Image: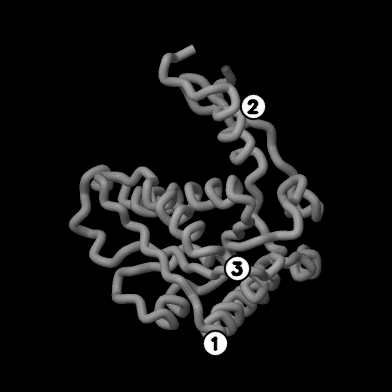
Amino acid sequence: MSDHAYSDAERAAVYRAIGERRDMRHFAGGEVAPELLARLLAAAHQAPSVGLMQPWRFIRITRTELRTRIQALVEDERVRTADALNERSDEFMKLKVEGINDCAELWVAALMDNREPHIFGRRTLPEMDLASLACAIQNLWLAARAEGLGMGWVSLFEPQALAELLGMPAGAKPVAVLCLGPVIEFYPAPMLVLENWAEQRPLSEMLYENHWGDRP
């Protein structure tokens, strides 16, 4: 074992947080203490980013009226998504897809504006700014789980409509509505598995060796 490895207990805690992280939709209200919220945001801000561009921007939603309007945007997209699902429409409409009105904290994670000058690591893969933001969200998610808080990532919204609602400058783009806060319990498995919407595929199906499709 590497001399740089954590202790057995510390490693177990890291893997536990990864394994028990859930995309939460059910919240218990309450609040998140300011010092705890600061720790979570600091964890997000420590995420890796291509070229150290740190493209993440987080907007805290504290006005009830704004929550209501964001929830309405999500509901509009939920209906459109159901229409696009055709034969699974009714099944989809039964799913709980957000906890916007129930969570203690509501945040919007967005990509910064004026990203074009950042070409380090993005010249051939410009979407690496999005990958960097996703890393920050994952950091926040895992830290929240370790602190006993639930978090849900909501992506059912029209980006331009949400950007206009929040007064974002041209070029900035909202990527996630994040519901954060206390929960009564964590799902024992991903909610979409529990609701028989989808099944998790085994890791072995995702692994190739040397060439695409060649199994190790």
In this view, the residue in front, 110 or 27, is 27
Q: Which corner quadrant holds the C terminus?
A: top right
Identify the element where label 3 is drawn: loop
In this view, the residue in front, 20 or 10, is 10
Q: Is residue 81 visible?
A: no
Q: Residues within 10 Å of mark 3 (few under 14, many from 20)?
A: few
In this view, the residue in front, 189 or 33, is 33
Alpha carbon separation for disc pair 1 and 2 = 47 Å
Q: Earlier in the sequence, mark 1 or mark 3?
A: 3
Which corner quadrant of the image does residue 89 belong to? bottom right
Residue type at mark 1 is Glu
Height in image: 115 above or below 20? below
Residue at the location (68% across, 66% down)?
97
- Check if mark 1's residue and mark 2's residue have beta carbons within 8 Å: no
**In the current view of this chain or complex, which residue is farthest to the top?**
1
Q: Earlier in the sequence, mark 1 or mark 2?
A: 1
Q: Which-is-in-front pick, marks 1 and 3?
A: 3
Picture coordinates of residue 136, whole percent (x, y): 43, 51
According to the picture, the residue beneath numbered tag 2 turns out to be 204
Identify the element where label 2 is drawn: helix
- Check if mark 3's residue and mark 2's residue have beta carbons within 8 Å: no
According to the picture, the residue beneath numbered tag 1 turns out to be 65
Residue type at mark 2 is Ser
Q: Which mark is residue 31?
A: 3
Identify the element where label 1 is drawn: helix
